[in-house]
Amino acid sequence: MHKTDFTRQYGSVMILFLMTLPVLFGLIGLAVDRTILYIVEAKLGAAADGAALGAGRLLGTPANPSEIAGEFLNANFPIGYWGTTNLQPSINYSLTSGLATITVSASVQVPLIFLRVFRVNAATVYASAVATRRTSRVVLVLDRSGSMNATDPISGLNVFTEMQLGAESFAGMFTPGFDEVGLVVLSTSAMVAYPTTRPYNNSPTSSGGPDTSFDTTATTGPMMTQLQAMAAGGGTGTPEALALAYIELQKAHNRDYSLNGGIDNAQNSIVLFTDGVPDSIAVSPNIAANDVVASSSPCKYKPASGTSNQMMGTIAVPGNPGSWSSPFGLFLLSAYDTSNTLTWWLQNPGNGQAGSGDLVQSSPAAALTNCTGLGNNNNFVLSDLTQIPPYDIYNTSTSGSAYPQSTLDLPNGTSTQPYAGVAYDPTDLSSGNTGAIAAWNDTDNIGRTVRSQTNMQPVTIYTVGYSGDGGTDAVLLKRLANTQDSTSYNSSQNSGFYIQVNSADQLGAAFNTIAGQLLRLAK
């Protein structure tokens, strides 16, 4: 190659290089400045997320979420970070129909380095984040049957006292003025202990339902007063308690739906604690559609011709699984009794059951005129009835076929199947199994009704069973909670969970675990 050819080619390359140098310089500058923008954007995004989450933890509390979010944003995005200027936050808080929302947006000016050559001195970076918190609407259902007033054999603690403490801690984890909390207590019959509206109205459109005024703190508040006033006694009216809890949720939904222009975003839950198995059902045995009073019975009103002579009370079976006594009734329903106050019933749960004297009667008492078994202390129901009523007073069926799956889990790790091989015959009123199985079926059926309803946001049921007093029915409690390992799991319904507690000192942790789950899901 001649020198002149080399010079000519080399010169062409140099010219081409010099022509592309600005382009290469621009690409390098763009890459460097773009990296800086990414770094600032990531930091600003993290600061916005932190501000939204930090303020989100306080949504529904008296704290000012907008102010808290601003403090988090400033703390997580330092002034002058990578030379940035003009941080512009935009924080918006809203509370609408049970849904609290905090939105954090921010922008900042980022100085550029290499692109200044092209007269681009700065760029704006944006970030935003949102946190929400739904109102948690929960009804706490507590078993205060007579077996609860016992010393736990493992911890040496009083079971009832530990349940009260656990329930108080549970209620105290929710936010007054934002969350809605209610309380149902059960013995032979059940009643709503908070809100304290009396006389009780079981219409879902009536006043009542869990509300934001429970005001429970570590030591004071309306819920605390009711929890501390409770005494233990009586049987285990689980199905009626669940029915009342469901009615209370409907009351709150209808109230809020109306107040919020047809919108209700609250998260609905029932939390049930029990130490045993269901043994009573609330019934009206002489209503026309459900009349099971024998034609040979001397009872005057069969069937009832009006509300004044409509029998209404509880049929219960004393004893324990495997050794049930024949069904007794009708016991006075504490929810509907108007002759005694709510406080009186909280402190006298054993009344209205066998051995309690003149309170063993239907309401109204006139409905039992001439009856020989119903309403008479220490007499069986078989002398007046032909069978267990097919429906309870809340129109829930007392029939079913799943009861043989029942498993009584004992604290020593063993279990029994109390109803295995037992045929449910509602006409066999001489058998204690008849009333106990009816109560089991009633409980299982009301749980299914609650979980499958579609008139409001889905309801999730959580269950806690204390096994230290002769065992607890894990199969039934898992079915109520619709756990994935239950014998009736339905993937189309909300799934809660079941916690088995083998000693009284575990009760507080169980309640707190469920409260934490409810609050986490509300975020």
Image (cartoon, rainbow, N blue to C red):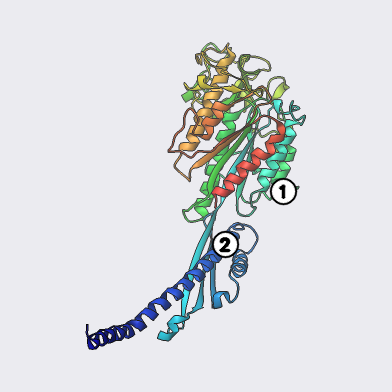
- Above/below status of 359 relative to 462: above
Q: Is residue 75 visible?
A: yes
- Left or right of 394? Residue 149 is right
In percent of width and height, residue 267 lies at: 53, 47
- Label 2 sits on a secondary structure element that is helix
Left or right, 475 with reference to 31: right
Quarter placement of the N terminus: bottom left
Q: Circle 1 sits in a helix, a strand or a loop, which is it?
A: loop
- Above or below 235: residue 243: below
Residue nearer the viewer, 138 or 131 = 131
Residue at (62, 44) in percent of width and height: 515
> Is 47 rendered above or below residue 462?
below
Q: Which mark is residue 221?
A: 1
First along the sequence among labels 1 and 2: 2
Residue kind at label 1, given as amino acid type: Gly
Residue marked by disc 2:
50
Gap in angstroms between the C-alphas marked 1 and 2? 33 Å
Residue furthest right in the image: 156
